Image (cartoon, rainbow, N blue to C red):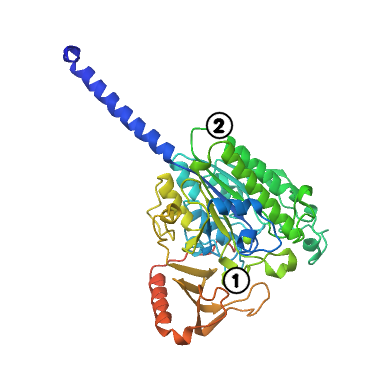
Amino acid sequence: MHSRRLLSASARGLLFLTFIGQTIGLLTLRSAAAQPNLIVIFCDDLGYGDLSCFGHPSIRTPELDRMASEGMRWLQFYSAAPVCTPSRAALMTGRLPLRNGMCSNQRRVLFPDSNGGLPAEEITIAEMLRDAGYRTGCVGKWHLGHLPQYLPTEHGFDSYFGIPYSNDMDRVASAPSGKLAITEPKSEYFNVPLMRDKQEVERPADQTTLTRRYTEEAIRFIKEPSEQPFFLYLAHSMPHVPLFRSSEFADRSRRGLYGDVVEEIDDSVGQILKVLRDEQLSRNTLVVFTSDNGPWLSQADHGGSAGLLREGKGTTWEGGMREPTIMWWPGTIAANQATLELGSTMDLMATFATLAEAELPRDRRLDSYDLTAVLRGSGNSPRETLFYYRAYELMAVRMGPWKLHLQEHGSYGSEPKKLTKLDKPKLYHLEHDPGERYNMASSQPGTVQQIQSLIDLHRADLQPADTLLEH
Ligand code: MG
């Protein structure tokens, strides 16, 4: 007491400030410790039926099966578009692709001669998390613009290693014409660059080693000594055609080449989860495994399988957009869960914002719902609807278990070859009929009407941006 009385007023003030400072410091530390690491493993054209834990009979995926048995399978989880570029834009921004111009009715995706890309004004998951104190790494296929101003390091990622567009693009003149370059692929047929940050480091990329090198890069990123939490976006180039795998995986799978490729991705997932366990990070890391769109069915046995779902890549039938999704976070997600809650890749933005205590963009419309209650087992998904777009065309809408088709378009030459508006929309009950075979519209006029009203509301609130894919 005596000594305290001796303290001058200014010293007391200083002590008080120090106390406040320490409290703020402690709070900041506590908050930083609570920020989990976040990993998204995003496959290219992997089908809903392509993993053993999603029912494939002859592709073996023991690592993904283990991930599922320790975590949660999402049986009704969707990409936001049935092709690469818009699907990736939506994941990155939590927004429907037509809100930011990353889709086109003419050119479905970006190509090596495109001048467009994800606009600088868009706020990506990586930018949001970097602002919240995360270090951020992007490994793999980008496909949101290959020109320097659109690359991952301009969109919130500290580092990038990968190919900037699809692995079948940039075919060289001397490559065999037609399907042969795909059915008997060689890396040198495709003049695809491999990049580190903004530098081309190899061209053509040796595609047989991509999955292995992406994995090594991802592990290096995870192990980087740092006090910061991290966000890793690992977007595999596979199993998009042309299919490549390293020699270690050649001729291993009963499913043939496609099986080899998926089994190498499975092994990659196993390596990543092992590093997280070894580094004692598993209880503080959420890993999300999913795919950008459904299987490319017209590639015959070089394409994957949507299992019991109808159609595949390029369409808004379930096979085009429902993805085999697993989320893993030991200690937070209970083991061996299979959920029928609705989710979308667009929801990762709001979910990650909650987990990272990050600030969601407030100056624009998001299409992102926070799924953390489902992960923690404390509640249902706030997502009750899905809007299935083919570029700017609203093709179908899901509300609860019901899905109403308004228009149809086949994929890659399948029927109907043109956009066809249905005189009478078709209604399917996706939980009774996941294969979309039995049109219930005539016996459920009330449900059709309800979904029509939902569409009116959705449209009233929608301001599509001009396409950036046709420049
Ligand atoms: Mg794809």
Residue highlighted by disc 1: 309
**In the figure, is residue 68 to the left or right of 113?**
left
Q: Is ligand 1 within 8 Å of the beta carbon of the residue shown at mark 1?
A: no
* Residue 146 placement (x, y as % from top left): 62, 52
Estimate the spatial distance between the alpha carbons at disc 2 and disc 1, rounded to whole Å. 44 Å
Q: SS at mark 1?
A: loop
Q: Identify the amino acid type marked 1.
A: Leu
* Residue 298 placement (x, y as % from top left): 70, 70
287 relative to 293, above or below: above
Q: Identify the amino acid type marked 2.
A: Pro
**Image point 62% across, 69% down: which residue?**
314
Q: Quadrant of the C terminus?
A: bottom right
Q: Quadrant of the N terminus?
A: top left
Residue highlighted by disc 2: 225
227 relative to 303, above or below: above
The answer, for residue 447, to whether it is visible in the render is: yes
Q: SS at mark 2?
A: loop
* Residue 25 placement (x, y as % from top left): 35, 30
